[in-house]
Image (tube, rainbow, N blue to C red):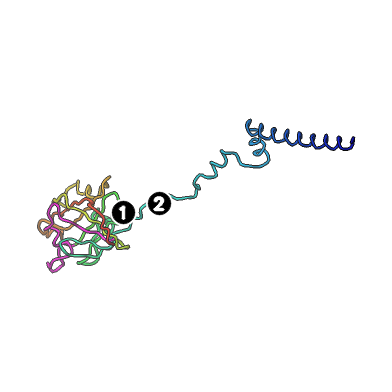
Amino acid sequence: MTKLLIGKKKIISIALMIVAIVLSVVLLFKLGMFDKFSRAVGSPSPQVQKENSAPSVFKQEIKPIYLPPKTVTFKEKTLDIEDVGVEEDGFLGVPSGWFTAGWYKDSARAGEQGNIVLDGHYDTNTGAPGAFWELKDLQIGDKVLLTDALGRKFEYAVTQKSYIAITDPERAKVFDSTQAKELTLITCGGVWDYASGTYNKRLVIKAEFDKMEKNW
């Protein structure tokens, strides 16, 4: 009988001990002590977890890719484009061929914010129509299409048409950059000046970006 009582006491003691442990754990959870303990033994804190979930510093922002124009189309005529620069005399260089256009390589690219500058010959050395012969026929609202190396097509609408004397000290302003997406087309105009060996004016067409064709 005594052994039986002792056995019951042990069972009761063990049960009470288990109850005490369970209550202690519950109390620790309520007080947040278990969370602190878990951090101490290696579990990351909520702040660390939040920081770890942030985007990697090596992740790059996706930005549009702009490329130099490869062709220009206006008045149902498409011309190949080559790079040109500014000559020592301050004039924009001209394309190597009579029937190609030149893209000023320090100007904006197709579809990009800024001023895209293109030039081309008005006529050939024999007086025959050159690449930009039809430029004089463009009117306000007419469309000019640029195509880049990926085949993307960028449409511009003509907004201005003017003539600038080659002696005009302000002529370089046609190269000025802009916050808009602008296209500047330049060719010869006026009358032939035998003394200088070129036309006495430049025809300048200004156009602004209208839309990008989606069927490329």
The x and y percentages for residue 115 are 26, 50
Front residue of 32 and 27: 27
Q: Secondary structure at mark 1?
A: loop
Dot 2 amino acid type: Ile
Single out the mark in the foreground, 1 or 2: 2
Q: Is residue 28 magenta?
A: no
Q: Could you tell me which quadrant the N terminus lies in?
A: top right
Residue 122 part of the magenta segment: yes
Q: Earlier in the sequence, mark 1 or mark 2?
A: 2
Number of residues whose C-alpha sits closer than 10 Å to that of mark 2, classed few (under 14), some (14–19) or many (20 or more): few
Horizontal relation, residue 21 to residue 201: left or right:
right
Residue ranking furthest to the left:
191
**Tag 2 residue:** 62
What amino acid is found at the position of numbered circle 1 in the picture?
A: Asp
Q: Residue at x 18, y 56 (%)?
A: 143
Q: Which mark is residue 202?
A: none
- Residue at image location 33% in from the left, 55% down from the top: 66
| Residue at the right extreme, as displayed | 2
Q: Are marks 1 and 2 in contact (CB under 8 Å)?
A: no
The residue at which mark 1 appears reads as: 106
Q: Quadrant of residue 83?
A: bottom left
Q: Which residues are magenta?
A: 121-147
